[in-house]
Amino acid sequence: MLKGFGNFLVKELKELIRDPKILLGMIILPLIMFPVLGGIISYSRQSAQEKAEKAALLVLNNDGGNWSVLFINNLTFIMKVFVVNNTNPQEALAQDLLSRYNTTQFIEIPRGFSENVTAHRHNSSIKASVEFYGVFSGGGIFEGTSSSMIDNLVYRFNRDWAPDVVYTEKSAIIKGNIAEGVDPGALSGLMLLQGFAMPITIVILLTYSMQIAATSVAMEKEEKTLETLLTLPMDRLAILMGKLSSSILVAAVGALASMVGFDYYMSSFTATIPAGATIDLVSLGLVPSVFGYLLLGISLFVTLLSGLALAVIISAFAEDVKSAQSIVGYIYPLFYIPSFVLMYLDVNTLPFAVKILIYAIPYSHPIMVAKAVTMGDYSIAAIGIVYVAAFTLVLLYVASRLFATEKILTAKLKFKGLRKLGKTPTEALQ
Amino acid sequence: MTAAVEAVDVVKVFGNIRALDGLSFTVKPSEIFGLIGPNGAGKTTALRIVSTLLLPTSGTVKVFGLDVVHEAAEIRKVIAYLPEEAGAYRNLSGWEYLEFMAKFNTKDKNETREMAKEAAEITGLGERLKDKTKAYSKGMKRRLLVARALMNKPKLAILDEPTSGLDILHAYHVREIIKRYVKEHGVTMLLSSHNMLEVEHLCDRVALLNKGKIVAEGTPRELKEKFGSVNLEEVFAKVVGLA
């Protein structure tokens, strides 16, 4: 049965294992990438938990009764609490109390709280409520942590005094305004799901467009058409610009298609919110404006251009299409990792070093811009665009130098020690 | 008269490899000059330097008096280079490929068409020019590429192994085209080959290349007489000490 299979299999395995591209791309990268991702998420979860526990809570006590004092004591068990008497939520915001007490959340104990708790002892249908208000800053898997902690504290109070005596009503503070009845935790969950769109778009667009650009250059080398082109009476820069321009057109269509798809995604998301829920992203102002979409489109476009230029440069080091596609694969972690990280986490919750790294990688920016324009923070979007554009200009300069010299024919990535067999490019040139 | 190609003491180094080691030769206008030698002798490197793809590490190369280092753009206007095993764009038809290439030589639409028509005639591919080049056999593709190289009647055509891998009929066809263009249009041909018998019948003069150096140069008859050999293959074996 299957005569020669074993011998052939051994040969195949030898070829695959000895190929440094496969070794690096298929084995070493996943071995590094996933532990790194896991480590970042674990660290962020831990730091979010610690941050929530250390966070200060402002209490607007409009009740003044004994039960409210007991309730506040219960809160102080794990949180640092500041109490302000006789101030309603609107006044608290108007007086900028959150900044003054350096917090992003407050609880209002309404008038009649103690009276209701006392009444509950005689009539269990009477309940007391507190209102939790949390500032919504754009989402992230751990943004609901504070909201959950309040739930735990209320549960603890009820357990100690009477089951279900106090319940919590929650509202979010979005862009300085109170969105009544919108649970910041639920809103974070919704925004988290919505936030999957841009990282996935980036991964798909960059993967495809970089493969197209790399293949386009490598095909010229593989088919030896590049040599012919380089000896024609034309500007060498015209070859590079021709390659990039056609790829840019594809990228521009890709960016436009992404914007249309993104807009549809956002609308459909709002529409599919279950009946009875009061969260509506459009009415909450949590969808980008036209200007926001414009910035997002520009950010996506310059990022794609940057990816294409990088692919062109990298493919110049490949001898054929197969090698070009493998080599381009080495830079996928540059957008895979930020995409996965930013899919779940807010950049501000990351460890400092990781945060710097994410900002330094140009391919992270459209993802952050998507969140920034949703929150109306256009300055972050603009800075991101300028940074990526500058990076792209540097890449274009390097690419133009490559095409202007013999490097486009002689450049080659070397895997010293791993590559012992086969022709070197210089030997191939003779 | 200005030489078509004048290479003087050309050295080309790639890392630790000395591909050309003091190469010197001269090609006269309207002659067929052959660089012959085994694989790795430096033929392709020499042709790539003449065609402005590579820069010499030292030495000078001039094409019709133009320096390959400082006047490369001017040289590209008067040469045509056919790489060994070159390909055409797979998704263009043969005709589209010829038109695409013709447009680099002239902006006039009529001239472009005439140039492509002449090239089409050289190929002898007839109706098959309407097919995409990916459907072509190796021989058909080579004929298309030779036609491309000669379509604008360049002052110098640099052909790297022009008949490499072709069967007898296709190789004969390509050789006939080369001879015709020299005779009818005065095109100078600089070609390389490791097929010494073919070169013997095609070239006016040849240079034997070994390890990056010219080891013998002259007309095929002169070389055979000088070394008392019946063909160039034997000449080469004697020169490098194999016979």
Image: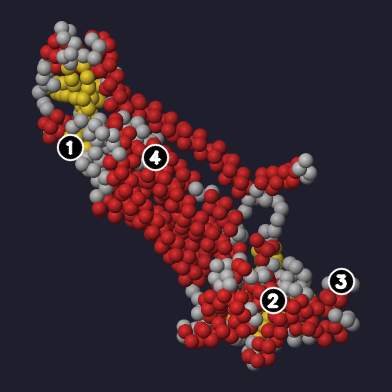
Quarter of the figure with residue A46: top left
Residue A343 — which label? Answer: 4
The answer to whether dots 4 and 1 both sit on one chain is yes
Which chain letter matches label 2? B
Up the image or down, A397 lies above or below A55; here it is below
Quarter of the image with the N terminus of chain B is bottom right
Q: Are marks 4 and 1 in contact (CB under 8 Å)?
A: no
- Residue at position x 38%, y 59% in the image: A252
> Label 3 is placed on what type of residue?
Gly
In this figure, which residue is indicated by the disc labeled 1? A177
Q: Secondary structure at mark 4?
A: helix
- Distance in Å between CA atoms under marks 1 and 2: 77 Å
In this figure, which residue is indicated by the disc labeled 3? B241
Sequence-earlier tag: 3 or 2: 2
Which chain letter matches label 1? A
**Residue A406 location (% of width, % of height):** 57, 67
Q: Are marks 1 and 2 in contact (CB under 8 Å)?
A: no
Residue B162 — which label? Answer: 2
